[in-house]
Image: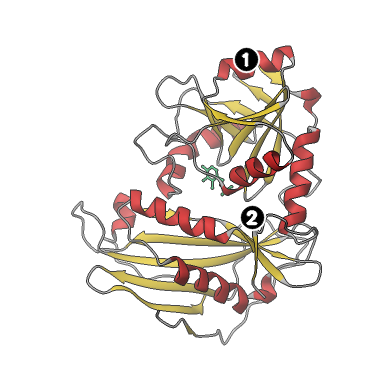
Amino acid sequence: MAEIRIEKTAHPKEKPDSGNLSFGKYFTDHMFVMNYEKDKGWFDPRIVPFAPFEISPAAMVLHYAPEVFEGLKAYRRPDGSVQLFRPQENIARMNRSAERMCLPQIDPELFMEALLALVRTDSDWVPAGEDTTLYIRPFLFATDPKLGVHAPSMCTFAIILSPVGPYFPEGVNPVKIFIEKEDVRAVRGGTGFAKCGGNYAGSLRAGERAEANGFAQVLWLDGVEKKYVEEGGGMNIMFKIKDKVVTPALLGTVLPGITRKSVIEMLKSWNIEVEERLVTLEEILTGIKNGDVEEAWCCGTAAVISPIGEFATEDEQYTIGGFKSGPLALKLYHALTDLQFGRTEDSFGWTVRVA
Ligand SMILES: *Cc1c(COP(=O)(O)O)cnc(C)c1O
């Protein structure tokens, strides 16, 4: 395997105040980069000072958008050491996303080595404030300087790091979600399961409209009948319906979240039944009205668990559990974050020590 070359910056940046971090605004001193050409494979893996890329104005990613990304975090443990949460899952998912976009596969061992080496290089940047983390953003895009529409033959893979503050600075609070009935995020056979920039580009309009009206996210419905519930913005969604937890099944349109997977495994370890299946909007709205839907939450790396207090359309509101964070959502939030930050023993074997 190729050695990772390390070129340290001569000008380390001043670190932002850890009480004052928002999401993805500050970047660390270094980044990982490597390049791909079809005849050569991946070459020159390197850790270099964080700096702009130079790409051709004809670079394929700027026109046809072959791009995939990942999101994970490095956590500062109480003993000062640093750990990752299920990074193997992000690596495997990025390769599945890449396959859908005709982007090349990355050797999982090299990917892991790059993650560890970069986080070690910038480990001073892992913040220590409560619920602060170092967000890790791996991404892969096509750079062929050609306007012809073909599978890419030149690519860049990079990893950048950003210290981030707590998602809920005032504690875990419920959010309002707008039921989006015009735009759709994904259709079967499309790219919904892939973590690609294009999915986000298509979802911006609905997200902006929802935000302007005071909503945190949109509820995405299926792209054909607009009958089934799929995701909550850029997060997976779950419902506690009587004694069970119900979540949309992974049928190609829902992003297979690692938080989703971890929540399911954790609930099962607590002997709570989980159903992965089609979930109709009708079932949820009726269940909210008659009290069967006791809790709802979104889940993803950024927020971990984000309780939902209300779903709304233009003219109707459906409030869940008196607009309070439900006990199961809060229990999951604490169990997951305690494990991620190393405050409890990791009986699942999900954490990987970095430094
Ligand atoms: C990344 C992402 C998720 C959550 O995945 P995690 O691995 O839990 O962070 C859910 N939905 C979409 C659309 C995503 O892009």
Looking at the rendering, in which quadrant would you find the C terminus? bottom right
Residue 324 horizontal side relative to residue 285, left or right: right
Q: Residue at x 79, y 41 (%)?
A: 331
Residue type at numbered disc 2: Phe
Q: Position of residue 136 (x, y in %)?
A: 57, 62
Asked if residue 113 is positioned above or below residue 104 in the image, the reply reads: below
Q: Could you tell whether 170 is left or right of 154 in the image?
A: right
Q: Which mark is first along the chain, 2 or 1?
A: 2
- Residue picked out by circle 2: 23
The relative height of residue 93 versus residue 313 in the rendered view (above or below) is below
| Quarter of the image where the N terminus is located | bottom left
Q: Which mark is residue 315?
A: 1
Rounded to the nearest angstrom, the CA distance separating label 1 from label 2 is 32 Å
Instruction: Identify the image quadrant of residue 12.
Output: bottom right
The secondary structure type at the circle numbered 1 is loop
Q: Is residue 296 left or right of residue 171?
A: left
Q: Residue at x 56, y 37 (%)?
A: 233
Does the Cβ of the disc 1 residue fall within 8 Å of ligand 1?
Answer: no
Residue at 44% across, 35% down: 253
Label 2: few (<14), some (14–19) or many (≥20) C-alpha neighbours in 10 Å: few
Q: Identity of the amino acid at label 1?
A: Asp
Residue 18: image quadrant is bottom right
The x and y percentages for residue 250 are: 48, 36
- Residue 251: where, in percent of width, then height? 44, 34
